[in-house]
């Protein structure tokens, strides 16, 4: 069965060579290879697609860099190459004016990559940059900002940087209190409670678990 799928994947690539819009076909072949867990072949197809995308197709270039970053980091554990594609995404966002949670997400992904490389200082630098992007949220992106701050707080916690974790949790909670019954607020309360529990701050942890429980019950 795997042999048949591999033949199909290679056939897709062969078809791509004969078409004008080749990068889309290589992209499709890459997706098929990834679904089949043939990650090296998927990387090859995605890289070929990226080399063929028109220079003005910014969204497509960004998405291919994203696919390659995630593939290299999560499946291939090729952190150096994942870092390259992650920084390409950050550069694209800076060049074309992306701000707020979307930019923060890109910084956060590079930070995650550095964490896997055991490079704490660069990890902290990118987490700090991600936090900076989340200042002054709007009504439109408030929920996304709250969730992103929670993710950054958890990342700091995993690195035993509890003060920075607490700072991000508390900023997020300040924002989420404007919408106390939303899912993001309830989840945030539970995450902060768990973070405090890990630090053996049992009394404070219990208080936040109770708040999460009360908020969740109020929704029902």
Image (cartoon, rainbow, N blue to C red):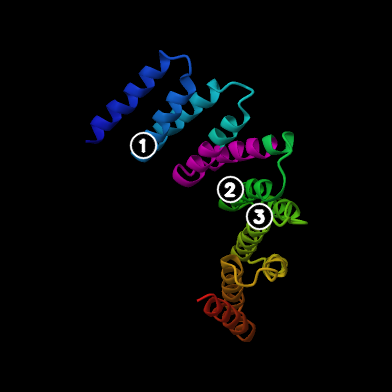
Please rate how many residues cluster around mark 2, counting C-alpha atoms within 10 Å: few if below 14, some from 14 to 19, many from 20.
Answer: many
N-terminal of the two: label 1 or label 2? 1
| Residue under numbered circle 1 | 38
Q: Is residue 23 left or right of residue 58?
A: left
Which disc, if any, is residue 120? 3
98 and 84: which one is in front? 98
Quarter of the image with the N terminus in it? top left
User: Residue 151's image quarter?
Assistant: bottom right
Magenta part of the protein: which range?
A: 66-91
Q: How far apart are marks 3 and 2 (CA)?
A: 10 Å
Q: How far apart are marks 1 and 2 (CA)?
A: 22 Å
Residue 11 coordinates in the image, percent (x, y): 32, 22
Residue 102 coordinates in the image, percent (x, y): 65, 47
Up-down relation of residue 39 to residue 114 (above or below): above
Q: Is the magenta stretch mostly helix, strand or loop?
A: helix
| Residue under numbered circle 2 | 113
Q: How far apart are marks 3 and 1 (CA)?
A: 31 Å
- Report helix, strand or loop for mark 1: loop
Residue projecting furthest to the bottom: 203
- Report helix, strand or loop for mark 3: helix
- Nearer to us of marks 3 and 2 is 2
N-terminal of the two: label 3 or label 2? 2
Q: In this view, does 17 lie to the left or right of 139?
A: left
């Amino acid at each position: 069965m795997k042999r048949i799928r591999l033949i199909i994947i290679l056939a897709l690539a062969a078809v791509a060579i004969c078409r004008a819009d080749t990068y889309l076909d290589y992209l499709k072949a890459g997706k098929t290879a990834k679904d089949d867990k043939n990650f090296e072949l998927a990387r090859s197809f995605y890289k070929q697609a990226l080399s063929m995308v028109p220079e003005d197709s910014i969204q497509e270039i960004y998405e291919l860099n994203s696919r390659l970053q995630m593939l290299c980091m999560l499946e291939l554990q090729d952190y150096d190459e994942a870092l390259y594609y992650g920084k390409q995404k950050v550069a694209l966002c800076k060049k074309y004016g992306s701000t707020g949670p979307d930019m923060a997400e890109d910084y956060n992904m590079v930070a995650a990559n550095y964490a896997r490389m055991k490079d704490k200082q660069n990890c902290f630098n990118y987490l700090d940059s991600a936090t900076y992007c989340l200042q002054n949220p709007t009504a439109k992106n408030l929920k996304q900002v709250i969730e992103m701050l929670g993710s950054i707080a958890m990342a700091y916690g995993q690195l035993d940087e509890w003060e920075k974790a607490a700072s991000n949790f508390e900023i997020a909670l300040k924002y989420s209190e404007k919408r106390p019954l939303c899912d993001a607020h309830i989840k945030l309360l539970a995450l902060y409670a768990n973070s405090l529990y890990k630090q053996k701050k049992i009394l404070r942890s219990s208080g936040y678990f109770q708040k999460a429980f009360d908020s969740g019950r109020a929704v029902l």
